[in-house]
Image (cartoon, rainbow, N blue to C red):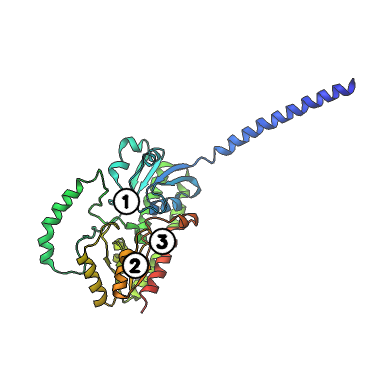
Amino acid sequence: MNWKKRLTYFVLGATMVATAVGIAGCGSDTKQAAPAEKMKVVTTVFPVYDVAKQVGGDKIDVSLLVPPGAEPHDWDPTAKDLKEIGTAKVFLYSGAGLEPTEKILAKDVLQNAQPVELAKSLTLLPAPDEDEDEHDHDHDKEHKDDKEHKDDKAQKEDKHEHEHEHGEFDPHVWLDPMNVAKEVDAVVEAFSKADPTNAKYYEANGKAYKEKLQALHAKYEEFGKTQHDKNLVVSHMAFGYLAKAYGFEQLGIMGVSPDAEPTPERMADIVAFIKEHNVKAIFSEELVSPKLANAIAAETGVKVYVLNPAEGLTEEQTQKHVTYLDIMEENLKTLKEALAH
């Protein structure tokens, strides 16, 4: 009988130990989860998302609303996107007319999220006129068409419910690295205010990232100073800030929005300009059809290169965790190859 008692005590003891371990395990899981809680940040487009990641590091949980492969100019937020915005503590968007702010900044959408427009801290360029050749100096024509252009603009403003129209500014602010550096400051300030416990962390990340942006700027500046061919014939006029910063001139096949179809007259003007100025390259984009660029290339014998406006990533680039710096370094390499004498 003695052995039966021993067996009973053993079973009871083992059960108590297992229960105690289970309780302790649950307790340790709870303890580990608490420090892992991160500040929720929601962003609209890739350039904004990338700045948020660089500044926020492992202290934030950041999401991107415009999906990989999508053209940001065409983005119309879904009900799911609008709901996601309301879950954020900080909501970052680029601004300058890129996103449909009448939808994303509605009070019932934001909930308790703090909205921050990154372009607000920058000096903005006017949107290029999609119907005007920047290299056409016929000022009489410009004044004659001015009233028609204003009337057309007024009509476009009534189409907001069905189509997102861009405003008076060029929204592609991030193509000047020094603009991104100013945006970094705005993000550091927003994150530090929303999460003061980690303010020093955000400040340190911001400072380190701005040093990288400064180094990138220096490379572009050096290239701009030594480059004689200053003409950039591009698919759509996204490169105004880059052109202004480094002394180039952009000529767009399409306007500020990549779905703005050029007229046959504009196509003919671009072909004539390329031939007259001995332009060496046409720059197309990954997220935009190269059809028009290829048509002009076939007409002029000029090679087509891919220049990335860094608006968004492809699925493949997303999987490879490509950054803004990666894209801009690749763009510089492409420019050097395409414009080489």
Residue 25 visible in the shown view: yes
Label 3 element class: helix
Left or right placement of residue 302 versus residue 12 in this view: left
Alpha-carbon span between mark 1 and mark 2: 21 Å
State how many labels appear.
3
Res 300 quadrant in image: bottom left
On the image, the x and y values in percent for residue 312 come to 39, 55
As drawn, the label of residue 103 is none
Per the image, the residue denoted by label 1 is 74
Q: Earlier in the sequence, mark 1 or mark 2?
A: 1
On the image, the x and y values in percent for residue 123 come to 27, 57
As drawn, the label of residue 213 is 3
On the image, the x and y values in percent for residue 177 come to 37, 61
Q: Earlier in the sequence, mark 3 or mark 2?
A: 3
Label 2 is placed on what type of residue?
A: Phe
Alpha-carbon span between mark 3 and mark 1: 28 Å
Q: Give the camera-side residue of 39 and 167.
A: 167
Left or right placement of residue 19 versus residue 223 in this view: right
Label 3 is placed on what type of residue?
A: Leu
Q: Residues within 10 Å of mark 3 (few under 14, many from 20)?
A: many
On the image, the x and y values in percent for residue 178 come to 35, 60
The structure residue drawn at horizontal position 50% and vertical position 48%, both measured from the top left corner, is 58
Alpha-carbon span between mark 3 and mark 2: 24 Å
Q: Nearer the viewer, mark 3 or mark 1?
A: 1
Q: Residues within 10 Å of mark 2 (few under 14, many from 20)?
A: many
Per the image, the residue denoted by label 2 is 283
Label 1 is placed on what type of residue?
A: Asp
Label 1 element class: helix
